[in-house]
Amino acid sequence: MPRLIVNADDFGLTRGVNRAIVQAFQHGIVTSATLMANAPAFSEAVSLLSALPEYQSRELSVGCHIVLVDGTPLSPPETIPSLLDPAASAPRFYKKLWRFALVAARGKISAREVELEASTQIQKLQQAGVTVSHIDCHKHSHMFPPVLEGVLRAAARHRIRSIRNPFEPSFARLSRIRFSGKNALRSVETALLNRRYARAFREAVQRHGLSTTDGSVGVTVTGTLDLNLFVETIRTLPREGTYEFVCHPGYNDNDLSSAGTRLLQSRETELAVLCSTEARAELQSAHVELINFWNLVTDAESKPAIPHPMP
């Protein structure tokens, strides 16, 4: 039986996104969310969590959505120079992922600085009373080795045991309905990134002792997800394994329009899918078990230790 974590990103981005994520958990299939420490509606998101008994009982896992691209830092700018866009008029991260990726590929991103900024963001959640179940990065920037190393160190420092596997398996990218239009180029890009970085990711996560999934689905169709794409994604899941469905529900209001995100009306479309009876029926028909990141932690804790050979 496949297991699926349905994680809503960008918690804290706007009040409308916050409202949609809570709605998709209470009335839909969302089981997890990741909270942005440096987003405008952070405090409201924390207040909403405190009113959810399901969060206290860990039926909803909440992680830290670490922002290292397209945002502003929480650390003093002079302590993280390699992460900042030198062309920006004020201390800001690189706006575009591809620019950040070029800097990372040249070895110009400091893992130590990533650790510092990631730790600062995680600490803000923890100081607000959020029990952080896992970590991931905005725009999946932790796929790049120096970023991943810093993020994993920050996770260890704050005793976080799970991390998103940002790499999308081929079964979730190459079907006819997904490999078309805007999704075709994104599918090719995702495949190239998988080939370049996926193995190093698995090795690093194992080395640091964190739990992760067998991959993420929904990545290629971000911004174009509808019910047909959701259904096909679920029907292509293997019979065994644990995967994360990455989603971005929200309300397309004035706050979202001024937030600088490319995902606008698509967030309302995703919300409708996530709360639909058809989506839940498809999961039941495919015998998919919905879980969250706390289940990964429990799985890891229940595994017997591997004995070391005698010298």
Image (tube, grey):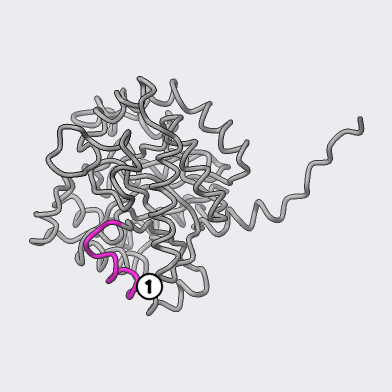
Residue 24: image x %, image y %?
Answer: 32, 64
Write down the quadrant of residue 306 in the picture: top right
The residue under the point 35% across, 20% down is 106
| Residue at 43%, 31% in the rendered image | 171
108 shown above or below 223: above
Majority secondary structure of magenta residues: helix
Q: Secondary structure at mark 1?
A: helix
- Residue at the spot of label 1: 49
Q: Quadrant of the C terminus?
A: top right
Residue 157 horizontal/vertical position (percent) = 55, 51
Left or right: 301 as drawn, with respect to 290: right
Task: Tell me: 130 left or right of 71.
Answer: right
Determine if the magenta segment contains residue 42. Answer: yes
Q: Quadrant of residue 51?
A: bottom left
Classify 168 as above or below 270.
above
Q: Which residues are magenta?
A: 38-48
Question: Is 144 placed left or right of 188 in the picture?
Answer: right
- Whether 131 is among the magenta residues is no
- Of 158 and 266, nearer the camera is 158
Hey, what amino acid is under mark 1? Answer: Leu
Extreme-front residue of the structure = 78
Could you say which is closer to the camera, residue 179 or residue 59?
A: 59
